[in-house]
Amino acid sequence: ILLSEQMMSDIRVDTNWKFCDLRVIVLENKYLKVHILPELGAKIYDLIYKPSNYNFLWHNPRILPEKVSLGSNYDDHFSGGWDVLFPNDSPGAVRGENYPDHGEVWAQSWKFEITEVSSERCEIHLWCMGRVTPTLMETWISLEKEETKVRFRHKLTNYSLKSLDFLWKLHPAMYISPCHRIDVPGRKAEFVDPQWSRFGEKVKSFDWPMAKSPDGSLVKDYCIVDPVESGHKDFIYVKELKSGWCSITDTEKKIGMGLAFPEDIFTTVWLFLTYGGWRNLYTAILEPCMAYPKDLETAIKTKNCGHIESKGILEFEVMATVYTGLKSVKNIDKVGTVT
Protein backbone atom coordinates (compact mmCIF):
# COMPACT_ATOMS: atom_id res chain seq x y z
CA ILE A 1 0.00 0.00 0.00
CA LEU A 2 1.57 3.26 -1.10
CA LEU A 3 1.05 6.34 1.03
CA SER A 4 0.42 9.61 -0.74
CA GLU A 5 3.10 12.27 -1.10
CA GLN A 6 3.01 15.15 1.36
CA MET A 7 4.72 18.31 0.20
CA MET A 8 4.96 21.96 1.15
CA SER A 9 7.36 24.46 -0.38
CA ASP A 10 10.92 23.04 -0.36
CA ILE A 11 10.03 20.40 2.23
CA ARG A 12 8.62 17.03 1.29
CA VAL A 13 8.17 13.46 2.43
CA ASP A 14 7.40 10.95 -0.31
CA THR A 15 6.65 7.26 0.18
CA ASN A 16 5.68 6.50 -3.44
CA TRP A 17 8.99 4.98 -4.47
CA LYS A 18 10.55 1.53 -4.63
CA PHE A 19 14.09 0.35 -5.30
CA CYS A 20 15.03 -3.32 -5.71
CA ASP A 21 11.46 -4.13 -4.63
CA LEU A 22 12.00 -2.25 -1.36
CA ARG A 23 9.96 0.72 -0.24
CA VAL A 24 11.89 3.99 -0.27
CA ILE A 25 11.02 6.94 1.95
CA VAL A 26 12.28 10.26 0.57
CA LEU A 27 12.93 13.20 2.91
CA GLU A 28 13.92 16.37 1.14
CA ASN A 29 14.53 20.03 1.82
CA LYS A 30 16.16 22.82 -0.18
CA TYR A 31 19.66 21.35 0.14
CA LEU A 32 19.44 17.68 1.10
CA LYS A 33 17.73 14.52 -0.08
CA VAL A 34 17.63 11.42 2.13
CA HIS A 35 16.51 7.96 1.00
CA ILE A 36 15.48 5.49 3.74
CA LEU A 37 14.73 1.77 3.30
CA PRO A 38 12.37 0.90 6.20
CA GLU A 39 12.14 -2.77 5.20
CA LEU A 40 15.92 -3.17 5.51
CA GLY A 41 16.67 -2.00 9.03
CA ALA A 42 15.69 1.61 8.28
CA LYS A 43 18.94 1.84 6.33
CA ILE A 44 19.75 5.31 4.99
CA TYR A 45 20.83 4.41 1.48
CA ASP A 46 21.52 7.91 0.15
CA LEU A 47 22.37 11.26 1.70
CA ILE A 48 22.67 13.70 -1.18
CA TYR A 49 23.74 17.35 -1.22
CA LYS A 50 21.47 18.61 -3.98
CA PRO A 51 23.40 21.69 -5.26
CA SER A 52 26.21 19.42 -6.53
CA ASN A 53 24.33 16.09 -6.53
CA TYR A 54 26.99 14.75 -4.15
CA ASN A 55 26.09 11.46 -2.42
CA PHE A 56 28.11 10.94 0.77
CA LEU A 57 27.09 7.32 1.23
CA TRP A 58 28.87 4.46 -0.52
CA HIS A 59 27.11 1.64 -2.38
CA ASN A 60 28.55 -1.82 -2.75
CA PRO A 61 29.10 -2.27 -6.52
CA ARG A 62 28.32 -6.00 -6.29
CA ILE A 63 25.47 -6.20 -3.80
CA LEU A 64 22.13 -4.45 -4.15
CA PRO A 65 19.89 -3.99 -1.10
CA GLU A 66 17.39 -6.77 -0.49
CA LYS A 67 15.21 -8.07 2.31
CA VAL A 68 17.08 -10.40 4.63
CA SER A 69 16.11 -12.71 7.47
CA LEU A 70 17.20 -12.32 11.06
CA GLY A 71 20.51 -14.08 11.63
CA SER A 72 21.80 -13.50 8.10
CA ASN A 73 25.51 -12.97 7.53
CA TYR A 74 26.04 -9.20 7.53
CA ASP A 75 29.09 -9.02 5.28
CA ASP A 76 27.51 -11.11 2.53
CA HIS A 77 24.52 -8.73 2.41
CA PHE A 78 26.45 -5.50 2.93
CA SER A 79 25.03 -3.20 0.25
CA GLY A 80 26.45 -0.01 1.77
CA GLY A 81 24.61 3.00 3.10
CA TRP A 82 24.07 3.82 6.77
CA ASP A 83 22.96 1.06 9.15
CA VAL A 84 22.34 1.04 12.88
CA LEU A 85 23.81 -1.93 14.75
CA PHE A 86 22.29 -3.15 18.05
CA PRO A 87 22.75 -4.89 20.52
CA ASN A 88 26.06 -6.39 19.38
CA ASP A 89 28.61 -6.60 16.57
CA SER A 90 30.25 -10.04 16.52
CA PRO A 91 27.72 -12.91 16.65
CA GLY A 92 27.72 -15.26 19.60
CA ALA A 93 26.40 -16.00 23.05
CA VAL A 94 25.93 -13.02 25.36
CA ARG A 95 24.65 -13.65 28.88
CA GLY A 96 23.18 -16.95 27.73
CA GLU A 97 21.40 -15.51 24.67
CA ASN A 98 22.55 -16.11 21.09
CA TYR A 99 22.98 -12.73 19.41
CA PRO A 100 22.91 -12.62 15.56
CA ASP A 101 25.65 -11.20 13.34
CA HIS A 102 25.86 -7.40 13.70
CA GLY A 103 22.76 -7.43 15.88
CA GLU A 104 19.06 -7.74 15.29
CA VAL A 105 17.79 -4.42 13.94
CA TRP A 106 19.64 -4.13 10.59
CA ALA A 107 17.87 -7.22 9.24
CA GLN A 108 14.34 -6.32 10.34
CA SER A 109 11.55 -4.37 8.74
CA TRP A 110 10.74 -1.17 10.61
CA LYS A 111 7.32 0.44 10.85
CA PHE A 112 6.99 4.13 10.13
CA GLU A 113 4.67 7.12 10.17
CA ILE A 114 4.96 10.66 8.86
CA THR A 115 4.75 12.92 11.89
CA GLU A 116 5.20 16.36 10.35
CA VAL A 117 5.28 18.10 7.00
CA SER A 118 5.06 21.89 7.27
CA SER A 119 6.48 24.81 5.34
CA GLU A 120 9.52 24.77 7.64
CA ARG A 121 10.11 21.16 8.69
CA CYS A 122 9.49 17.52 7.90
CA GLU A 123 9.84 14.48 10.16
CA ILE A 124 9.37 10.73 10.01
CA HIS A 125 9.12 8.32 12.93
CA LEU A 126 10.43 4.76 12.53
CA TRP A 127 10.37 1.94 15.07
CA CYS A 128 11.29 -1.70 15.51
CA MET A 129 10.65 -4.25 18.26
CA GLY A 130 13.54 -6.51 19.14
CA ARG A 131 13.18 -10.21 18.47
CA VAL A 132 16.11 -11.31 20.60
CA THR A 133 16.04 -8.52 23.16
CA PRO A 134 12.78 -7.25 24.73
CA THR A 135 13.36 -3.74 23.45
CA LEU A 136 11.71 -1.09 21.33
CA MET A 137 14.01 1.06 19.19
CA GLU A 138 12.58 4.31 17.80
CA THR A 139 14.12 6.96 15.59
CA TRP A 140 12.75 10.32 14.47
CA ILE A 141 14.52 11.75 11.41
CA SER A 142 13.89 15.37 10.47
CA LEU A 143 14.97 18.13 8.10
CA GLU A 144 14.58 21.87 8.56
CA LYS A 145 13.85 23.95 5.47
CA GLU A 146 17.08 25.96 5.22
CA GLU A 147 19.55 23.62 6.95
CA THR A 148 22.21 21.27 5.61
CA LYS A 149 21.64 19.00 8.61
CA VAL A 150 19.81 15.73 9.21
CA ARG A 151 18.56 15.50 12.77
CA PHE A 152 18.07 12.17 14.53
CA ARG A 153 16.28 11.60 17.82
CA HIS A 154 16.83 8.08 19.15
CA LYS A 155 14.87 6.32 21.88
CA LEU A 156 15.45 2.84 23.31
CA THR A 157 12.98 1.24 25.74
CA ASN A 158 13.87 -1.88 27.70
CA TYR A 159 10.73 -3.92 28.47
CA SER A 160 12.68 -6.64 30.27
CA LEU A 161 12.48 -7.40 33.98
CA LYS A 162 16.29 -7.29 33.89
CA SER A 163 18.80 -4.61 32.95
CA LEU A 164 20.45 -4.86 29.54
CA ASP A 165 24.08 -4.32 28.54
CA PHE A 166 24.59 -3.69 24.84
CA LEU A 167 26.56 -2.26 21.94
CA TRP A 168 24.92 0.44 19.82
CA LYS A 169 26.79 1.68 16.79
CA LEU A 170 26.14 4.09 13.94
CA HIS A 171 27.50 2.58 10.74
CA PRO A 172 27.59 4.97 7.73
CA ALA A 173 29.71 3.62 4.86
CA MET A 174 31.17 6.67 3.16
CA TYR A 175 32.13 7.37 -0.42
CA ILE A 176 35.89 8.03 -0.54
CA SER A 177 38.74 8.93 -2.88
CA PRO A 178 42.46 9.62 -2.32
CA CYS A 179 41.41 13.26 -1.89
CA HIS A 180 39.40 12.51 1.24
CA ARG A 181 40.40 13.24 4.83
CA ILE A 182 39.08 11.68 8.05
CA ASP A 183 39.01 13.72 11.26
CA VAL A 184 38.25 12.36 14.74
CA PRO A 185 39.11 14.27 17.94
CA GLY A 186 40.68 11.27 19.67
CA ARG A 187 43.89 11.00 21.66
CA LYS A 188 44.63 7.29 21.42
CA ALA A 189 43.95 4.56 18.87
CA GLU A 190 44.14 0.78 18.88
CA PHE A 191 43.89 -1.81 16.13
CA VAL A 192 40.94 -4.16 16.50
CA ASP A 193 42.99 -7.16 15.39
CA PRO A 194 46.47 -7.68 13.86
CA GLN A 195 44.79 -9.31 10.87
CA TRP A 196 43.02 -5.99 10.29
CA SER A 197 46.14 -3.85 10.35
CA ARG A 198 48.83 -3.10 7.81
CA PHE A 199 51.24 -3.16 10.76
CA GLY A 200 50.33 -6.71 11.77
CA GLU A 201 51.77 -7.60 15.18
CA LYS A 202 54.27 -4.71 15.10
CA VAL A 203 51.89 -2.01 16.37
CA LYS A 204 48.89 -2.58 18.65
CA SER A 205 48.16 1.00 19.74
CA PHE A 206 49.33 4.51 18.90
CA ASP A 207 48.73 8.20 19.45
CA TRP A 208 45.98 9.17 17.05
CA PRO A 209 46.29 9.77 14.12
CA MET A 210 49.94 8.87 13.45
CA ALA A 211 51.08 5.25 13.61
CA LYS A 212 54.58 4.00 12.89
CA SER A 213 56.46 0.75 13.21
CA PRO A 214 59.16 0.50 15.91
CA ASP A 215 61.95 0.67 13.34
CA GLY A 216 60.34 3.63 11.57
CA SER A 217 60.08 1.73 8.28
CA LEU A 218 56.31 2.20 8.05
CA VAL A 219 54.49 5.41 8.97
CA LYS A 220 50.80 6.11 8.42
CA ASP A 221 48.69 9.20 9.06
CA TYR A 222 45.19 7.74 9.40
CA CYS A 223 43.54 11.05 8.60
CA ILE A 224 44.66 10.49 5.01
CA VAL A 225 42.74 8.08 2.74
CA ASP A 226 44.84 5.66 0.67
CA PRO A 227 44.22 4.95 -3.01
CA VAL A 228 42.44 1.70 -3.80
CA GLU A 229 45.61 0.37 -5.40
CA SER A 230 47.26 0.25 -1.97
CA GLY A 231 45.28 -2.86 -1.11
CA HIS A 232 45.29 -2.03 2.61
CA LYS A 233 42.66 -2.76 5.22
CA ASP A 234 42.63 -1.37 8.77
CA PHE A 235 40.12 -1.61 11.60
CA ILE A 236 40.75 0.87 14.40
CA TYR A 237 39.26 1.99 17.70
CA VAL A 238 39.78 5.73 18.24
CA LYS A 239 39.56 6.38 21.99
CA GLU A 240 39.75 9.15 24.58
CA LEU A 241 37.56 11.50 22.58
CA LYS A 242 37.96 15.18 23.33
CA SER A 243 34.43 15.82 22.07
CA GLY A 244 31.65 13.97 20.28
CA TRP A 245 32.08 14.22 16.54
CA CYS A 246 33.79 12.74 13.49
CA SER A 247 33.95 13.81 9.85
CA ILE A 248 35.08 12.98 6.35
CA THR A 249 35.98 15.70 3.85
CA ASP A 250 36.57 15.72 0.11
CA THR A 251 39.55 18.10 0.08
CA GLU A 252 39.42 18.54 -3.70
CA LYS A 253 35.74 19.52 -3.89
CA LYS A 254 35.79 21.08 -0.42
CA ILE A 255 32.66 19.31 0.77
CA GLY A 256 32.18 17.02 3.71
CA MET A 257 29.86 15.41 6.22
CA GLY A 258 30.26 15.22 9.96
CA LEU A 259 28.44 13.41 12.75
CA ALA A 260 27.82 15.14 16.08
CA PHE A 261 26.88 12.88 18.99
CA PRO A 262 26.92 12.84 22.82
CA GLU A 263 30.42 11.65 23.75
CA ASP A 264 29.25 10.44 27.16
CA ILE A 265 27.12 7.87 25.28
CA PHE A 266 29.23 7.15 22.18
CA THR A 267 32.60 6.81 23.87
CA THR A 268 34.68 5.58 20.92
CA VAL A 269 34.76 5.96 17.15
CA TRP A 270 35.59 2.79 15.24
CA LEU A 271 37.04 3.16 11.75
CA PHE A 272 36.62 0.34 9.26
CA LEU A 273 38.92 1.24 6.37
CA THR A 274 39.10 -0.95 3.30
CA TYR A 275 41.30 0.47 0.59
CA GLY A 276 40.87 -2.52 -1.68
CA GLY A 277 42.16 -4.89 1.01
CA TRP A 278 38.81 -6.45 1.98
CA ARG A 279 36.83 -8.05 -0.83
CA ASN A 280 38.36 -5.52 -3.23
CA LEU A 281 36.04 -2.85 -1.80
CA TYR A 282 36.86 0.82 -1.28
CA THR A 283 35.09 2.62 1.54
CA ALA A 284 35.57 4.12 5.00
CA ILE A 285 32.96 3.44 7.67
CA LEU A 286 32.76 5.97 10.50
CA GLU A 287 31.37 4.13 13.52
CA PRO A 288 30.56 6.08 16.70
CA CYS A 289 29.99 3.31 19.23
CA MET A 290 28.82 2.84 22.82
CA ALA A 291 31.02 -0.18 23.46
CA TYR A 292 34.66 -1.21 23.43
CA PRO A 293 36.04 -3.65 22.41
CA LYS A 294 34.31 -5.56 19.61
CA ASP A 295 33.54 -8.56 21.82
CA LEU A 296 30.47 -7.57 23.83
CA GLU A 297 31.13 -10.04 26.66
CA THR A 298 34.52 -8.39 27.23
CA ALA A 299 32.96 -4.92 27.06
CA ILE A 300 30.38 -5.96 29.65
CA LYS A 301 33.04 -7.30 32.03
CA THR A 302 35.01 -4.05 31.82
CA LYS A 303 31.81 -1.93 31.92
CA ASN A 304 32.65 -0.29 28.59
CA CYS A 305 29.24 -0.67 26.96
CA GLY A 306 25.74 0.72 26.88
CA HIS A 307 23.51 -0.05 29.87
CA ILE A 308 19.80 0.38 30.46
CA GLU A 309 17.85 -0.65 33.54
CA SER A 310 14.71 -2.76 33.59
CA LYS A 311 11.79 -0.74 32.17
CA GLY A 312 14.30 2.00 31.45
CA ILE A 313 14.45 4.49 28.57
CA LEU A 314 17.52 5.89 26.84
CA GLU A 315 17.09 8.99 24.64
CA PHE A 316 19.66 11.09 22.81
CA GLU A 317 20.17 13.09 19.61
CA VAL A 318 22.62 12.73 16.74
CA MET A 319 23.18 15.15 13.88
CA ALA A 320 24.64 14.63 10.42
CA THR A 321 25.82 17.98 9.08
CA VAL A 322 27.00 18.79 5.56
CA TYR A 323 29.53 21.57 5.06
CA THR A 324 31.35 23.19 2.16
CA GLY A 325 34.48 25.31 1.68
CA LEU A 326 36.69 23.31 4.08
CA LYS A 327 39.57 20.88 3.63
CA SER A 328 39.64 19.65 7.23
CA VAL A 329 37.60 19.90 10.43
CA LYS A 330 38.74 21.12 13.84
CA ASN A 331 35.41 20.93 15.65
CA ILE A 332 31.70 20.25 15.29
CA ASP A 333 29.61 21.58 18.14
CA LYS A 334 26.34 20.22 19.51
CA VAL A 335 24.21 22.26 17.10
CA GLY A 336 26.21 21.07 14.09
CA THR A 337 28.38 24.15 13.50
CA VAL A 338 31.58 23.10 11.72
CA THR A 339 34.93 24.84 12.09
Image (spheres, rainbow, N blue to C red):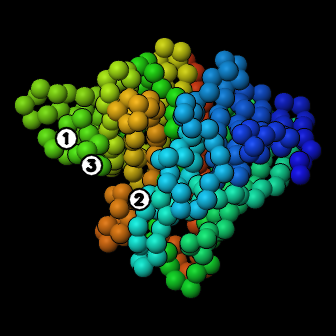
The answer to whether 242 appears left or right of 266 in the picture is left
Q: Are marks 2 and 3 in contact (CB under 8 Å)?
A: no
Image-quadrant location for residue 236 = top left
Count residues near mark 2 (Cα–Cα under 10 Å), then give few for <14, some for 14-19, many for 20+: some
Farthest bottom residue in view: 161
Which percent across, then down, holds residue 297?
Answer: 35, 69
Residue pointed to by mark 3: 193
Helix, strand, or loop for circle 2?
A: loop
Q: Residue 263: which numbered mark, if any?
A: none
Q: CA distance from mark 1 to mark 2?
A: 21 Å
Please give left or right for residue 186 compared with residue 308 in the image. left
Instruction: Tell me the residue that label 2 is attached to.
Output: 90
Looking at this view, is 53 or 201 the one in front? 201
Going by the numbered disc 1, the residue's amino acid type is: Gly
Q: Is residue 86 visible?
A: no
The type of residue carrying mark 3 is Asp
Picture quarter containing residue 27?
top right
Front-most of 129 and 146? 129
**Considering the numbered disc 3 on the image, is that residue within a helix, a strand or a loop?**
loop
**Outermost residue toward the left?**
215
Earlier sequence position, callout 2 versus callout 3:
2
The quarter of the picture where residue 59 lies is: top right
Report the side of 161 relative to 127 (left or right): left
Tell me which residue sits at (23%, 46%) in the image.
194
Count of number-bearing discs: 3
Q: Amino acid at mark 2?
A: Ser
The disc, 3 or 1, on the residue closer to the chain's N-terminal end is 3
Q: Badge 1 is on which residue?
A: 200
Relative to 53, say whether 126 is above or below: below
For mark 1, does the 10 Å Cα neighbourhood hold few (<14), some (14 to 19), or many (20 or more) residues? Answer: some
Q: Upstream in the sequence, badge 1 or badge 2?
A: 2
